[in-house]
Image (cartoon, rainbow, N blue to C red):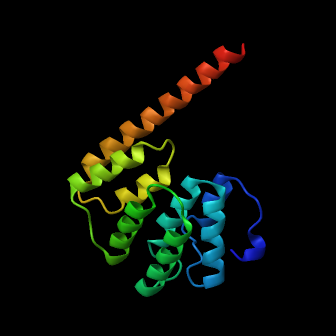
Amino acid sequence: MTPSQCKPMSEAEYLVSIDCCFPCHDEAAWRAAIDLGIGISPNAGFAALDELSRPPRSAAAPEPRQKRMLAYWRARMKHPLTRVLARCAALRIEGKLLKPREATGIMKLVAEYDGLHAALAVVLSVADSASLIDIMVDDLIIRWREDQEDQAADDWARYS
């Protein structure tokens, strides 16, 4: 993705555009991709974090470059979860894991913000005990869906 390709797009289009092909080899392109994601939505911003913290399949991203991308992302992303998720991404880059209790604690923080699936992916990527975490993720996604359905029903009742 080059800066000229950074035109308005939906969150879904953005997620597809960076999925397993984050432009880590080109500094101008990765800066533009991070800025674009952050500008679209918090979830898109966290999707950029998810992608930059793992080496893409098509080309290796040396750890120092990933750490530069992470520092750039952290300086640009303005969200209450930025600090804790940047720490998770740093652990991922270093190949380290969180203890299950710490991972579930962070997931509970993420749960306070509806629809941040990419933020959950970052935490899940460094969780030491995937089975417990998977159960929490499933429960959280179900809760978010129920909240959306409740909101839609409230909106329908209010306007009908």
Q: Position of residue 146 (x, y in %)?
A: 48, 28
Q: Is residue 16 left or right of residue 146?
A: right
Residue in the foreground of this view, choosing between 141 and 158: 158
Q: Where is residue 9 in the image (x, y as percent from the top left)?
A: 73, 57
Q: Residue at x 47, y 44 (%)?
A: 113
Give the mark count. 0
Q: Residue at x 53, y 76 (%)?
A: 72
Q: Is residue 65 above or below residue 121?
A: below
Residue in the foreground of this view, choosing between 149 and 129: 149
Q: Is residue 70 above or below residue 36?
A: below
Q: Is residue 59 left or right of residue 104?
A: right
Q: Position of residue 117 (x, y in %)?
A: 48, 49
| Quadrant of the rendered image containing residue 16 | bottom right
Where the N terminus falls, by quadrant?
A: bottom right
Q: Residue at x 66, y 56 (%)?
A: 40
Where the C terminus falls, by quadrant?
A: top right
Q: Residue at x 57, y 72 (%)?
A: 22
Residue in the foreground of this view, choosing between 138 and 71: 71
Q: Where is residue 149 in the image (x, y as percent from the top left)?
A: 55, 26
